[in-house]
Amino acid sequence: MRMKVYRFYAIFLTLIALSVLQQVQAQSVSVELGEGQIGINEQFTITVKVENERLQRYGDFPQIPGFEQAGTSSSSSTNIINGKVSSSQSVIQTYIPTREGTFRLPDFQIEVNGKAVRATGTTITVGPAQQQSRNNNNPFGSDPFEDFFGNKGQSDEFVDVDDEAFVALSNSKDTVYLGEGFTTTLAFYVAEKNQAPLQFYDLGKQLTDILKEIKPSAAWEENFNIENINGAPVKINGENFTQYKIYQATFYPFNLDKIKFPSVSLKMIKYKVAKNSSFFGRRKQESFKTFYSQPKEVVIKPLPPHPLKDEVPVGNYKLEENVSAKTLETGNSFNYTFKVTGEGNISAIDKPTVRQAESLEVYAPNVEQNISRRNNTVQGSKAFSYYVVPSEPGDYKLSDYFSMVIFNPTTEQYDTLTSDVEVHVEGKSLKNASISSQDVGNFYEELTNTDNQLRSRSQSGWLQLTANILILVMLLITIVLVFRK
């Protein structure tokens, strides 16, 4: 009896699993393209079809050269065959040709329900206008579709819809200390209740011209390198907007001159909307509108008085350090890393001050730098790795040898980054090791046995004269031999 119960449950679970697997496999998403040859008065379509799944959301349809998007429509169907229920939903994007010719729709992808669906492109040929079918008995009769959709015998009329959008240049700070960073953001904002269709126009070329105007010459730039323009929700004066960041960078001023950002312009495609929209008619007409930002400026303050105010790094920094060994013998080496981390102009940080001492031989450091630009700030680290050789036994507090003075703009005070590491060195003194390694042997002994009688250098004059005469004779003999040959 128990065996039969187990067998029943096994069969039941298998049927459920097969049913679920069949439903999952039945779900599909497809992209269908319209006819590749159309007339100038006809339309091209791209259809996204979802079967056995709810069409919750979809991304932007591709732009096609020589065509204008004329709106979307949707449809759905449900079928029951032999007790099996199947359903499908479709969204259709309509394109209207603007001129005759051959146009290429490249391969593209569109996001459907959070998943990217790839589609193969095609070539579209737009020819002369095609004859529209009319009532043969009455060539001037009405088109039933025009009657049904309310576009009987009237031309499209487009109206300009008020837009609730603007372009703005903003700075994270209006006043900074010399060397302190501030972040500049150029963005386009669209209100949540905006009804005017807007689109970016030739943004790459426009941005090149804009940056020539707004980039300050007397400041170091850390560019956030925005590659994809994505909308992000923001709230301005209690109203919901979508922010599209176009450019963002953090600047670190070099001098006390006020940094001025002029008003810049951004040209956008703004569509006029059909006053009497029909199913087959054009829904919008392309036009342009130029938006202007407000000028901005940033005031630069000098650092407070300090002997090193022209040299210190400015930022919110802290010290991280590492030592390879804290106990060692004289003559052995250890590695010490002085690492400055935090928010600020990492590139401008110079190596720390190193106090020279006969008992410690410190070699030039290796430098490693890391910079991260995110969340409207520039953060990172700069590490200085030293190779150190002690020649005297004892306890060495590295704070006596390595230090760095910084200015913290948050606390508005100077601070000194000093080490907390102490190294213990054992063994015998090697202070005179370098002298003994260069010993010339019995030099001093030979020196005491050498004759110290003074001799005149003029005695060697006859020897030099004889040598010169011999050289001259050899030269004359050489010339005679050459001429005789």
Image: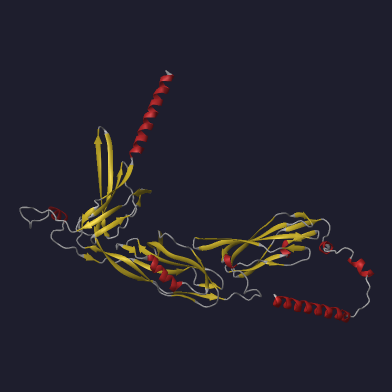
Position above or below: 478 against 368: below
Split into 4 quadrants, where in the image is the C terminus? bottom right
Side of 390 relative to 196 (left or right): right
- Residue 303 vs residue 260, the one in the foreground: 260
* Numbered marks: total: 0
Side of 223 relative to 244 (left or right): right
Split into 4 quadrants, where in the image is the N terminus? top left
Residue at 25%, 43% in the rendered image = 77
Position above or below: 211 against 284: below
Outermost residue toward the front? Answer: 484
Q: Position of residue 288 (x, y in %)?
A: 30, 68
Residue at 94%, 69% in the rendered image = 449
Q: Position of residue 219 (x, y in %)?
A: 52, 72
Q: Position of residue 392 (x, y in %)?
A: 81, 60
Position above or below: 453 against 35: below
Q: Position of residue 59 (x, y in %)?
A: 34, 53
